[in-house]
Amino acid sequence: MVFRYYTLFSVATAMSVLFTFLLFGVFLQSHAVYAAPGAHGPDGEHLATDTHTQVSLNPRFETFSDVFELVGELQHDTIVLYLHDFATNQFIADAQIELESGELATTADFVAAEHHYIIKNPELVQRLQQASRHELILTIISVNQADLLTASLDNSEHLTHVNDVPEHHHHHVPWWLLVTGFFILGAGFWLGRRGVTT
């Protein structure tokens, strides 16, 4: 009888422990989604992205020639430009970059600490933020090279997708797992009680 009680008690305890580890595993899995690595920037660096969306929602444009390769990103109040040598993919510093859109034109400032160029012309930024296709002309002059590039920034589809971003849903423990777990606990408790009464 003692052996039987001990066996039933051990089964109940094992079921309880198993259920606890099962819940803990589901908890870790539901939170592992937020530990995914971020996107890579034009220089290959990891970007600090919003882990809820995991993607950058900023409109971008790209253009290149046999001399330069340029990537631009339209942010809230600035335009960020990344300039590379097309052949070597090396970042180009201290170049002169002029961006034109229609009758508006402005030059970019080099930010050495960030390895990029920025444009803070409010009128130009506001125009590019309008939902439309914007044709851009970029004049680039570096120490050894010069070129004229064209690009298109189409943020009409981008603005539509921003309004359609789904709400973030939290990861909950599945209801069926809770029901199964409580059933296991109940069965273990019943077996333990039965062992005591018999």
Image: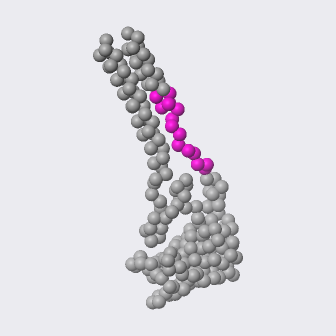
The structure residue drawn at horizontal position 57% and vertical position 82%, both measured from the top left corner, is 109
Residue 154 shows up from this direction: no
Query: Residue 171 in magenta?
Result: yes
Q: 151 or 105, which is in the foreground?
A: 105
Give the image's coloring scheme: one colour
Query: Residue 131 in magenta?
Result: no
16 left or right, relative to 56: left
Expressed as whole percent of the image width and height from the top left, the position of residue 91 reads: 44, 78
For the C terminus, give its image quadrant: top left
182 left or right, relative to 9: right
Is residue 166 depicted above or below 152 in this figure?
above
Expressed as whole percent of the image width and height from the top left, the position of residue 53 reads: 55, 55
Residue range corresponding to the magenta coloring = 166-181
The structure residue drawn at horizontal position 68% and vertical position 68%, both measured from the top left corner, is 130
The structure residue drawn at horizontal position 54% and vertical position 75%, both measured from the top left corner, is 81
Q: 105 or 28, which is in the foreground?
A: 28
182 left or right, relative to 10: right
What residue occupies the far top of the structure in this picture? Answer: 198
Expressed as whole percent of the image width and height from the top left, the position of residue 68 reads: 47, 80
For the N terminus, give its image quadrant: top left
Quarter of the rendering containing residue 187: top left
> What is the total number of numbered labels drawn onto the structure image?
0
Q: 148 or 107, which is in the foreground?
A: 107
Q: 76 or 27, which is in the foreground?
A: 27
Residue 144 shows up from this direction: yes
What residue occupies the far left of the structure in this picture? Answer: 3
Is residue 96 depicted above or below 79 in this figure?
below
The structure residue drawn at horizontal position 38% and vertical position 14%, both measured from the top left corner, is 195
What residue occupies the far bottom of the structure in this picture? Answer: 144
Is residue 123 depicted above or below 23 in this figure?
below
